[in-house]
Amino acid sequence: MFLRARSPSPAVRFAWLSAFAVLAGSACSNGYAESTLLSAADQAVESTAASHDVARVLQRGGEWVAGAQEKCFPHSWKGGDAARFAVAVESELCLRARMGEGLPLADMRTEIAAQSVGNATLLESELNLFAARAGAWLPVTGSPTAEAEVLVLGYQVWTDSISAPELEFTRDFTLLNFDKAVSAPFNIGPVPATVSAGVRARLDARVSGTLALVNARGNLTPKLASGGYAQVAVDAMIARGGVEGALELLNDTVHLDGKVGLGVDVTQNPPQVFFAGEALGTNQLAALSGAIRMFAETAGDGRMFEREFFRWEGIRQDTELFRKTFAPRPLFRAQESSVAENVGEVATR
């Protein structure tokens, strides 16, 4: 990980925050994927808010024309057989502006939060395979903060928190292999047995970003590749047993890409503080493809018994979950008496 602090740039006078989340399966490239997002709202900020200070306009006084803003985009999918193998994935991207009358200036901020979660159910026992979360807070006054964490099987395996006026950072995290199995009684014909159903997986994650006084970008890129397996145990005095087959359990790629920001629109008279944002979500999913068969051969007479443990043709899909661009929405209108003074200050900067 590298952190490089830089002196704040006085030309940066609008708030933007971007976050990106990816979960990638083994069928994907080993490199970290990137997504693109049209920047209509970005252009609106640049054309109307460059060189203007949101905090300064708010401090001069005026009237609120809208309150706090929140846009959340959830997605979920699940499939399989909970008695054998099943998986469920959830993701959500939220963009917020915590603004409004009665809220102290020091508490006003924009926020973005992204999370992706993958769960598996083996023999009706639920496992929290992983959870990856990242968020950033851009206060109107003060330094921005970014946080991220990764959990595997319910345990936090990595976390980081960064707060500074301006910095750049990148960090990579890899958990090469983790394995978890559960067991239950299972008969193969007349032969009593114990079956173990398990998952083997690899998780990679990258977190990177750029934070400034009122401008930030962040990247969260966790990648999961997992397969399911089964084992069978029988009493050697009675029979011998075995398992055949393979299962692609969960390989999933979710892209969550968002921007949120505040700006000052000086084309309005009086000037207005506005909120704008963009959100893009895509999902490439491959899960539950394969079959597992169990067999047992009795020790006395050599009779062979078979039983199918799991078979599913699986699912493969490439879907755009959402694509939204929010036109700049006025939140605050400056006082008429402060217009000339504000414009004069900007002209002398």
Image (cartoon, rainbow, N blue to C red):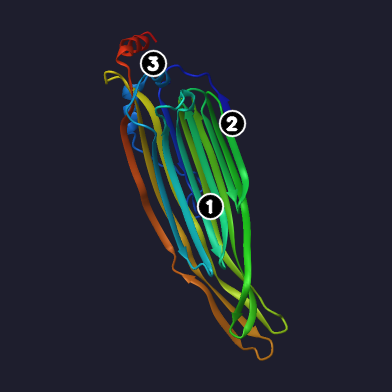
Q: Which residue is mark 2?
A: 2
Q: Against 6, is 158 above or below?
A: below
Considering the numbered disc 1 on the image, is that residue within a helix, a strand or a loop? strand
Disc 3 packing (10 Å; few <14; some 14–19; many ≥20)? some
Looking at this rendering, what residue extends furthest in the right direction?
237
Q: Which residue is mark 1?
A: 224
Q: Against 81, is 343 above or below?
A: above
Residue type, numbered disc 2: Phe
> How many numbered badges does the structure rendering display?
3
Q: Nearer the viewer, mark 3 or mark 2?
A: 3
Residue visible at 39% across and 16% down in the picture:
60
Q: Is residue 247 left or right of residue 102?
A: right
Considering the numbered disc 2 on the image, is that residue within a helix, a strand or a loop? strand
Q: Which residue is mark 3?
A: 60
Q: Position of residue 266 (x, y in %)?
A: 30, 19
Residue visible at 50% across and 38% down in the picture:
135
The quarter in which the C terminus is drawn is: top left
Do residues under tags 1 and 3 come within 8 Å of each other at their CB atoms? no
Residue type, numbered disc 1: Leu
The quarter in which the N terminus is drawn is: top right
